[in-house]
Each structure stands twice: as C-alpha cells, then as structure tokens.
Image (spheres, coloured by chain):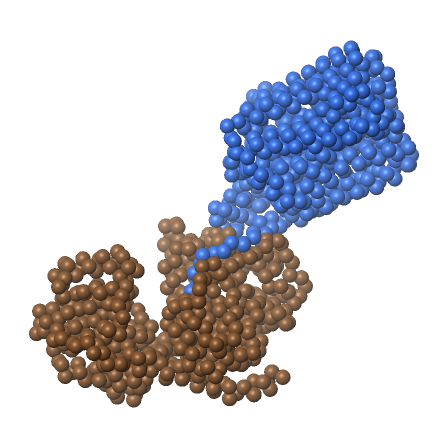
Chain colours: A brown, B blue
C-alpha cells in the first residue's frame, strides 16, 4: 500500500519529456510520501533502460504492455451470464456521450473480484460475432459498407488494449493520479470504481486532441479512402480510433475527482471534450528558478542578440523566424541571431533553413549553433523568439525569464498567458514580451524591431519576466500545488476508508 | 482404401483435371475420368482386380489352402500398410498442401526420399517381426516383407501425387504396373506354385512403386533442400494423426473381428480370414469407386473454387454483404454436389443391391454372401456421404469434429460388428452398415453446424500473437 499511485502512459521512467520530468521532480520533492507506479507501455520490446533515477520512495513499478497481443484464436462461448443487450445499450448510450453504464460493464465483465466471464474470450466468441454482425449491418448499407476484415480487426485492436487495462491489477494506494487520459485515465477510472479512492487526472497536453492529429496523419491505420469517391466524413476506421480515445477521455473526465492542466487554453479544450469546468484546476509547470537565475559572468557585448532555442523542425517554424530577421536587419543596431538546438532531427528541413538564410543574405547574421547548454545562451541574448505553430507550455520561455530575457512568441499554447499574465495579479505585473500570430514573419519582425529600438521597454519587460517566473512559475510552486492537492484528499482519507468498509 | 488421400492433395489435381471435364469432347471427358479414377483409387482398384484375376487363374495350379495363404498375404499387407500409413497421411498432406499454397516445392524431393527411406526401414523391421511367426521359406518371407513395404511406399507416393503434374504418366504407370503384376505373379506361380505367386506379385508391385518413385523423383529433381519442417506438422497437428489412424482402423476393424471370431477361419501362422465376409465387402466397396473418383474431383474443384473465392474475398477486404453472398456460394456448390452425388450413387447402389443375387451367381461366388454384400453396398453408400462431409469439414479446419466422427465410426463398427459376429449369419455386415449410418448422421450434423457458422469461425478463430509496432507513447 502506497500513498499515491501514479498512472503513467509511455512516460517516466522509460521515456524523457515534459511529463516525465514533472513526475520525477514531484517524487523527488516529496520523500515523505510513498509512491507506486503503474506504467502503461506499448510493447515490452524496445522499452530500454530507465531514463531517470528511481527515488527510494517509489515502492513498486508495475508495467503492462497494451500492444503485446495474444489472442489464441479458438472459438469461445461466453455462456448464459453474458448479456449482449447490456453491451448494445452501452454502445447506444455512448453515442450520446453517456458513459454511466460503463461501471456496470466493468463490474460484470472485467473486475476480477466480481466478473462472471473472461473478457478476453469475448474477442473470439460467437456472441461477439452476433453483436458485430448486428452493429455492422445496422450501421452500413450494402452500398457504403466497408471492408469487413478491417472492421473486424479494428474492433479487436480498439478493444484489446482497453480489456488489457481493465483486467490488470492496480497497486493499492490512497490516491490514484493519472498523468493523461487515454489508457492511463482508464486505469484511474478503474481504481475509482474498484477501490473508491480519489482519482486525480492531470493532462499536460490534451490526449484526445493529440491522438486525433496523430491518427489523421498516420499511415498505419486502415484507410478506406482508396477509391475516388469523395467523402465528407473521416475514413471510418480512423474515426473509430478517434472516437475510442474521445470516449476514454470523456470517461476519465467524468470519473476524476479533480482535473488539472497546464494553462487556460488546455482547460477550454478539456471543456470542449466534455470535462466539467468546475473540476478543472490549472497547475502550470515550473522551472528550477534558483538554478536558472544564477548570474552568469560572461560579458555581454553591444551587438543586439536575438535567440531562438529549440529543435530545428517544422513545428517550430524556424523559416518564419528566419524571414522575420530580414525585416530586422539593417535597422539602427547591429544584430546577431543564434539558433540554438539540435539540427539533425529533420535534415531536409534544416537544409531548407540554411538555403533560406543564404537566399536572404543573412549568412553573417544567423548562426546555427547546434545543441548547447541553454544556461550559457540566455545571459548573452537580448530577446528570445518562439515562432512555433504549436506549443503546450514551453519551458524555454520560463528559463529565459529567469535571466530576465523578454520573449516574443507566436500566440500558441500557453504563450499568451506566460507573456501577459494569467490571473489578475499576474496581469497587473505587465507584459514580459510580446505575442504575434503564427506564420507571420512581418508581424514577428516588427515586434522584434519594437523591442530592439526601445531599450527602456525591453529592460522593463525583462524585469517583469524575472518577477513573473519567480512568483508563479517556480518548480517548487508547481510541485507544491500537486502535493497540496494530494493533501486535500489525504484529509479525506478516513472518509474514504469508512465508505469502503 | 485410401479415401482420405483425396482430401488435400486432390484439389490440385482436380484443378488440372477440370480442363478435361470442361471440355466438350467425349474422348477428353473419358480420359479425365480415367485419370481421376486411377489417381484417386489406383492402388485399391489394382489390388482388387489383380487378386481377382490371379485367384481365378491360380485356383487350377495351387491348393485351396495355398490360395488362401496368398490372399491373406495380400489383404494383410493391404490392411496393415493402410493403418501404418494412416498415422502419417494427414499431417504429411497438410504439410504438402501448405507448401503448395505458397508454391514452394523445394523440400518435396528430400522429404519424399527421407520418408520413403524411413518407411522402408521401419516396415522391414515390423514385417520381419510379423513373418517370423510363420514357417515360410526365406525367399517367401522376404517377398512378403518386400510386398508390405512396397505397398506402404505406394501409399506415400500417392500423397505426393497431389503435388505432381505428371498424372498421365502416373495413370499409365498404374495400368501398366497392374498388368505387369498380374503376369509376373501368374507366370512365376505357374512355375513355382505359392512362392512363385507371392514373389511375382511383390515384383509387380515393386514395378509400380518404382514407376511412381522415379516419376516423382524426376519431377522434383533439382530441388535440393532438406528441411525437417514437416516433422513439426506431426507435433502441431496431432489431431490429424489420430484422424487418419481412426479412419483406417475403422475401415478394417470389422474385417479383423470377422477374421478372429468363430465364423472366421485359421489359415496359417498369424493369418485368419473370413472368405465370405472379405470377398463380399471388397466387392461392395467397388460400388462407390466411380462416385469417389469422378464426383470427388468434381466436388472438390467446384467446392474448392467457391471456398477459395470466399477466403480471397475476405483477404481482398470485401464488405460483409459480399462475404455472406460468397458463403452462400459455398453452401450452394456443396448442395449441388451432394445432390448429384446422391442421384448418381443411389442409382448405382440400388441396382447393385437389387441384383445382388444375380451378381454373385455371375461371378460364381456362393449366394450365401448376398446378405453381407447387400449390407456392404448400403454401408459403402453411407460411407461415401460421410467421407464427403468430413472432407469438407477438414477444409474448414474442423479437426475436432472429424476426430469425433471417425471415433464414432471406429467404435460403433467395432462394437456392433463384434456383437453381430456372434449372431446369425444373415446379420453379418450389419455392424459396418449401422456404424456408417451413425457416423453419417454425426458427420452431417457437424457439417451443417459448421457451414452455418463459416463467418464466425473464419474471423473469431484468427489468432493474434505478434508484437505490434504501433506506438502509443
């Protein structure tokens, strides 16, 4: 029995990234709490080593792998305890966004303590066949009916991972905390049903949204659009997967006691996907302020230095940034541009960027530094630019703030909140940079020029930046917010205990 | 009788023979029928006909006892080789069919050589042991052992025929081999009596074996690749081993019982026989040979086309209404085949049944055999249908059902035959008939059930065990 069970899907401790480091910081910062980890991975193969140390207050790590399939391929019968009308009703209600019957399904068919059937048998059962046939023929007319084998496998593959989660054994804990919706959220829902424990749901990125983009771009999903017939709706198998993920999100939103996310924009998306607004709290990510704010003794010269920190990949829209420099060059000041970050991730794109630099005659101005210790970069730049098409809550902005560097960013993710402030107190601090629409090199250029030519404004913004990160975005604040949340529920520990008995 | 040989192997040949059947020319059609008769029932027909002819001619030269010994040698070799072969037949045919499906014949020659070699060694040991209980002269015993192993190797070659293209050569090889067997046996017999008949017969059969062996060897030549993969089929498809074994044991168990029980007769060494029962039954079996030969090729080609068409439509990602239509196509082709098999075989069997007495008289056989012969006709008639059902079941991988059906066949045949063997003479053969009846009912029910669930089985029995590379992280 641990205090908190963290339900992690494809993140800590095997994969690096924002969620993983957040989790790691949290565990490290709370040695008085014991944790168990329920790790949900794709396949055991290629999992690799731990990418983070495991603090000693992590008591156990339980792993399940969703896509390590095993379906025997023997025809099974579910028997008389199986009620197909329940399944039909559940699917019917699901269409209108009603998830209530899921609990009944879980108790009857999945919960190892109360179930009457082996749910995996269902994937190879006569009963499933009857249901599939019924649903298929009621949904499609002979004219638009899709490939049946694809329908069949999509059914199996959409359901299998769900069955796997629902039949796995969760570590016992006082609080369950899932770090995304999807399968992790499902495990949280299961804990909520089974142990009647508080379930906290944290979404850094919006799972449904990310999966949707991934599925639409993916090649591996069965595509029915091989014919030339124009279709308004999505290919049905992609649509199916998207609906599954949307359902999982909705279910987790419904059952979670508290939902947290990083910034207001995400909150709006969660509400759009069905979360109740009163459940949602915003806990932004923080940076290690004492570390990043350490003064750096490298002398800064007179050249106005514009920094870009990030991978040179299309989503960061480095090209727009390069074009914007053409507007800035040849003004009152001598400028230098540093593009700091790995270039090898998308070689063709990097090559395009280099050509663009040459074409615009900026070879002497723009330097691709490759990967560098960013701590050495912030002290020597005057302004940080972010030209991304999409962002969550970019840590580079906060890191730059620690050194009092103002930021000009595109209006994506939480950038507007980070630059103009979120709460009214925060807003009162004033802007710590500027926000421009994405993909507009002209606006971006003009904004850079404005800051370059107004030293006073820039310095003021820099000071605000430092104050902002110090007040609202420190790692300890962020971690503290999560721990406070736990504490709220620990206070209720006895209530839950009684309820259970 | 090797009905099961037709099961997997024949689909291939059936396709090639279809050219003959779809042709307009009567000569071509006859040729097609001849090939299919020879290929599906060659060894069986050859044995019955040569025995019949040799007995007819030999009865003037050797004593009745010696003739009985001679017949026993042949029918024991025949029975034992089939049961022996029954254990290997189905896994091997499945292996060949799987390889043919992916058009990979590279291992056939070596597998064929290896199996024939093992059979020869094992057969010699078993045969040697068996004939050590007889007081035959050495050359006689040797001929008997050689005959046994030769027949087993002919059965084995028959399986590989499914993978062969030279069915013309093989058909003529059989016809020539039978004629040669008859003459060599007769001529040697004239000179040396029983030992001559036996050696001559063995030499004749060896000729057939050599013709089959060399034509297969030449055809598979140049594909030098020794693979022991086929051994895994014996492990993976254990049910198939039992199916083959139960089937052949089922076919022979009533004969064994009638040999051993009081109505049977001691011949010599370990030989027992039952003259009336054997002869009547063997003759009765002849009644379904035309059906087996012609209709089974027909059925298998028509049915197999619908069958393959359905599975191809699944793979080609067709929609459910179309799949259901193709399932209906399978049903219809089977219904049509059953219907014409029914018409044709009923006609033949009814006539033979009606004229049973006259036939016995014409063949100068004792009319005491008539009741057994009639039971045999009826039993074989039913057997033709239950074989049909089980072959189709095997196409749908319903191995458990087939195993159950053949277990019913074996056990009911054993029990009822045993009881009837102690009863009145006029009930001899009723065990076989009743057993075929029960087996047919069970087979028919399981086939119907299976056919109504083609979709369920096809999809739900798809195993999934691979590790997918789908990335969810």
Is there any visible trace of residue B23 in the rendered image? no
- Can residue A65 be seen here? The reply is yes
Q: Quadrant of the C terminus of chain A?
A: bottom right
In the image, taking residue B9 as reference, residue B246 lies left or right, namely right
Q: Toward which corner of the image does residue A480 lie, by quadrant?
A: bottom left
Depth order, front residue of B323/B388: B388
Is B142 located above or below residue A231 in the figure?
Answer: above
Closer to us: A390 or A231: A390
Residue A240 at x, y = what percent? 46, 61
Say if B363 sits above or below A275 in the image.
Answer: above
Q: Residue furthest top?
A: B191
Q: Residue at x 51, y 86 (%)?
A: A490
Query: Looking at the image, which residue is at 62% across and 70% down?
Result: A112
Residue for point 52% across, 87% down: A492
Residue at the far front in the pictured view: A297
Say if B239 sits above or below A354 in the image. Answer: above
**On the picture, is B229 further left or further right than A281?**
right
Q: Is residue B8 left or right of residue A435?
A: right
Picture quadrant where residue A115 is located: bottom right
Q: Residue at x 55, y 65 (%)?
A: A163
Q: x, y (%) of residue B64?
A: 86, 18
Measured as percent of width and height from the top left, residue A465 is found at 24, 82
């Amino acid at each position: 029995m641990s205090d908190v069970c963290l339900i992690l899907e494809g993140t800590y401790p095997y994969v690096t990234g924002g969620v993983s480091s957040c989790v790691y910081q949290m565990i490290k910062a709370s040695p008085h709490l014991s944790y168990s980890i329920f790790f949900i991975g794709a396949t055991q193969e290629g999992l690799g080593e731990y990418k983070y140390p495991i603090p000693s207050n992590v008591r156990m790590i339980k792993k399940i792998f969703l896509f390590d399939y095993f379906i025997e391929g023997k025809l099974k019968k579910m028997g008389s305890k199986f009620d197909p009308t329940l399944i039909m009703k559940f699917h019917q209600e699901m269409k209108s966004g009603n998830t209530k019957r899921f609990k009944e399904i879980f108790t009857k068919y999945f919960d190892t303590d109360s179930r009457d059937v082996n749910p995996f048998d269902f994937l190879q059962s006569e009963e499933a066949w009857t249901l599939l046939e019924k649903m298929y023929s009621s949904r499609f007319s002979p004219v638009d009916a899709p490939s049946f084998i694809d329908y069949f496998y999509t059914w199996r593959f959409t359901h299998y991972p769900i069955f796997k989660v629902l039949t796995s054994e969760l570590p016992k804990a006082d609080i369950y905390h899932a770090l995304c919706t999807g399968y992790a959220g499902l495990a949280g829902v299961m804990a909520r049903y089974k142990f009647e424990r508080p379930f906290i749901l944290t979404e850094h990125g919006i799972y449904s949204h990310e999966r949707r983009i991934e599925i639409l771009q993916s090649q591996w999903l069965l595509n029915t659009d091989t014919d030339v017939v124009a279709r308004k709706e999505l290919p049905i198998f992609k649509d199916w997967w998207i609906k599954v993920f949307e359902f999982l999100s909705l279910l987790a939103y419904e059952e979670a006691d508290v939902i947290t996310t990083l910034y207001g924009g995400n909150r709006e998306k969660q509400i759009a996907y069905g979360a109740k607004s009163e459940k949602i709290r915003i806990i932004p990510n923080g940076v290690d302020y004492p570390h990043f704010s350490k003064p750096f003794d490298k002398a800064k010269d007179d050249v106005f230095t514009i920094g870009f920190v990030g991978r040179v990949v299309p989503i960061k829209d480095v090209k727009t940034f390069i074009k914007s420099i053409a507007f800035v060059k040849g003004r009152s000041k001598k400028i230098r541009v540093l593009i700091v970050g790995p270039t090898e991730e998308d070689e063709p794109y990097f090559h395009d960027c280099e050509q663009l630099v040459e074409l615009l005659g900026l070879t002497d101005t723009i330097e691709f530094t490759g990967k560098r210790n960013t701590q050495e970069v912030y002290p020597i730049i005057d302004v940080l630019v972010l030209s991304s098409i999409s962002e969550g809550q970019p840590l580079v902005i906060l890191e730059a703030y620690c050194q009092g560097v103002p930021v000009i960013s595109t209006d994506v993710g939480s950038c507007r909140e980070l630059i103009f402030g979120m709460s009214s107190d925060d807003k009162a601090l004033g802007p710590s940079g500027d926000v421009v629409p994405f993909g507009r090199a002209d606006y971006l250029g003009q904004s850079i020029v404005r800051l370059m030519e107004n030293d006073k404004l820039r310095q003021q913004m820099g000071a605000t930046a430092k104050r902002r990160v110090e007040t609202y975005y420190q790692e300890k604040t962020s971690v503290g917010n999560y721990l406070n949340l736990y504490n709220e529920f620990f206070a209720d520990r006895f209530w839950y205990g009684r309820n259970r008995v | 009788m090797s009905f099961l040989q037709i099961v997997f192997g024949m689909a291939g040949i059936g396709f090639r023979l279809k050219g003959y059947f779809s042709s307009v020319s009567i000569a071509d059609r006859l040729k097609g029928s001849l090939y299919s008769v020879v290929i599906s029932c060659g060894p069986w027909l050859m044995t019955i006909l040569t025995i019949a002819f040799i007995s007819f001619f030999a009865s003037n030269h050797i004593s009745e006892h010696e003739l009985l010994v001679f017949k026993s040698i042949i029918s024991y070799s025949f029975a034992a080789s089939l049961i022996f072969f029954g254990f290997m037949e189905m896994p091997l045919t499945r292996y060949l069919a799987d390889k043919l499906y992916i058009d990979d014949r590279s291992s056939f020659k070596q597998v064929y050589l290896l199996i024939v070699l093992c059979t020869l060694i094992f057969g010699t040991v078993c045969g040697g042991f068996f004939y050590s209980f007889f007081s035959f002269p050495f050359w006689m015993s040797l001929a008997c052992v050689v005959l046994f192993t030769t027949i087993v190797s002919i059965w084995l070659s028959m399986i590989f025929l499914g993978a062969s293209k030279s069915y013309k050569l093989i058909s003529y090889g059989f016809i020539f081999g039978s004629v040669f067997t008859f003459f060599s046996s007769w001529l040697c017999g004239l000179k040396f009596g029983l030992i001559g008949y036996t050696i001559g017969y063995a030499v004749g059969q060896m000729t057939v074996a050599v013709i089959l062996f060399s034509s297969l060897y030449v055809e598979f030549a140049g594909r030098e690749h020794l693979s022991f993969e086929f051994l895994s089929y014996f492990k993976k498809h254990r049910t198939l081993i039992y199916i083959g074994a139960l089937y052949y044991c089922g076919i022979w168990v009533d004969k064994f019982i009638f040999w051993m029980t009081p109505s049977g007769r001691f011949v010599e060494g370990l030989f027992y026989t039952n003259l009336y029962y054997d002869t009547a039954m063997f003759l009765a079996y002849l009644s379904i040979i035309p059906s087996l030969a012609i209709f089974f090729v027909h059925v298998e080609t028509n049915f197999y086309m619908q069958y393959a068409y359905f599975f191809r439509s699944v793979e080609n990602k067709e929609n459910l209404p179309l799949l259901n239509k193709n399932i209906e196509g399978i049903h219809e082709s089977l219904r049509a085949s059953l219907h014409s098999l029914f018409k044709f075989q009923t006609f033949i069997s009814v006539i033979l049944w009606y004229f049973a007495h006259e036939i016995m008289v014409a063949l100068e056989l004792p009319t005491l055999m008539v009741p057994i012969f009639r039971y045999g006709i009826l039993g074989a008639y039913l057997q033709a249908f239950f074989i049909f059902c089980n072959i189709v079941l095997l196409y749908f991988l319903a191995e458990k059902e087939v195993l159950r059906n053949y277990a019913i066949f074996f056990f009911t045949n054993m029990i009822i035959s045993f009881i009837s063997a102690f009863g009145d003479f006029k009930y001899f053969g009723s065990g076989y008939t009743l057993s075929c009846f029960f087996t047919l009912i069970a087979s028919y029910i399981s086939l119907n059930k299976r056919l109504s669930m083609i979709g369920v089985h096809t999809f739900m029995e798809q195993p999934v065990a691979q590790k997918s590379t789908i990335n969810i992280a």
